[in-house]
Amino acid sequence: MRSSNPVFSRRGFGRDNGYAGFNTAPQAGGPAVATQANPYAQPTGNPYAQNPYAQADLQYGAPPQAPATTGRMTIDDVVMRTGTTLGVLIVTAALSWALLPVDDANISRSYGIGIGAALIGMVLALVQSFKRKPTPALILTYAAFEGVFLGVISNIVDNRIADGAAMQAVIGTMAVFAGVLVAYKAGWIRVNRRFYGFVMAAALGFILLMAVNLLFAVFGGGDGLGFRSGPLGIIFGVVGIILGACFLALDFKQVEDGIAYGAPREEAWLAAFGLTLTLVWIYMEFLRLIAIFNSSD
């Protein structure tokens, strides 16, 4: 299937031009129903080509069982690579927190390094997003630079705005992750074409508003249109967290379909990359919300 992240559009496990898994196809003698074609169906001549699970479409968007072959992605692969990516991010965040002080004498230098790391991380994430295949070294390098930025910005908020903000944001991010995972596995969240379209439209509108607000802040001074401070900032912070939760559901669906379709093991890095982007998004929204609440006291 094809999924996206609130920050960067990226290729998913599908190789078609649409959102795989939610196409409609007319059935003989009946109305159109949802079908799901396997993007990893093997070509004729492959020993696995006759696998009924690799070739058949299933109705109602239910993914087929993965062919029992080696070299295919498993949930363990996704967990291991996601843990590795997040581990690199956490280590570099801790190092930047410790080595880049944010006292009055050093905050400008540390903040500059953090912003520089964020820009490098953004470029690396964009490069990976447009690559056809995941590159582990690129993903881990992105995580390292993103960790430097998160370490600096978290240190600033924690020490100069709200004591304990970083830990609160981490707990909030973990709670959202666990809550969405439980809701997804229980079937309370149904990821279908309508859900995907709604989330993408909402995310596009959100990002455009934030870009306009940033432009006004850069050229007009202050906080731009006020979307990131005060009551409006709180509202947009909550919306940002909800969007992040929706993208977690899309990420879970992406992983589920990749495993069901027998995606190559290397695609687990793509899942790790997407989950990391989404978790960073949610963490930053929590951190921003905490800063707004404390700055208004």
Image: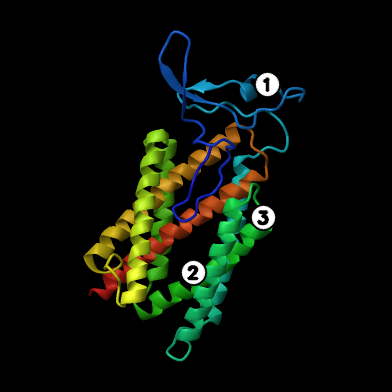
Q: Which mark is residue 250?
A: none
Label 3 neighbourhood size at 10 Å, few (<14), some (14-19), many (20+)? some
Identify the residue under disc 1: 51
Residue at position x 56%, y 81% in the image: 99
Distance from the alpha carbon under mark 3 to that under mark 1:
30 Å
Q: Is residue 43 above or below residue 119?
A: above
Q: Nearer the viewer, residue 14 or 267?
A: 14
- Amino acid carrying mark 1 in the image: Asn
Q: Residue 87: x and y, percent?
A: 59, 61
Q: Is residue 90 above or below residue 35?
A: below
Pick whichever of labels 3 and 2 is earlier in the sequence.
3
Identify the residue under disc 2: 150
Pick whichever of labels 3 and 1 is earlier in the sequence.
1
Q: Residue 292: x and y, percent?
A: 29, 70
| Numbered circles on residues, count | 3
Distance from the alpha carbon under mark 3 to that under mark 2:
21 Å
Q: Is residue 179 visible?
A: no
Label 1 neighbourhood size at 10 Å, few (<14), some (14-19), many (20+)? some
Q: Nearer the viewer, residue 235 or 157?
A: 235
Identify the residue under disc 3: 136
- Amino acid carrying mark 2 in the image: Leu
Q: Name the side, left or right, on which 40 lies relative to 202.
A: right
- Amino acid carrying mark 3 in the image: Pro
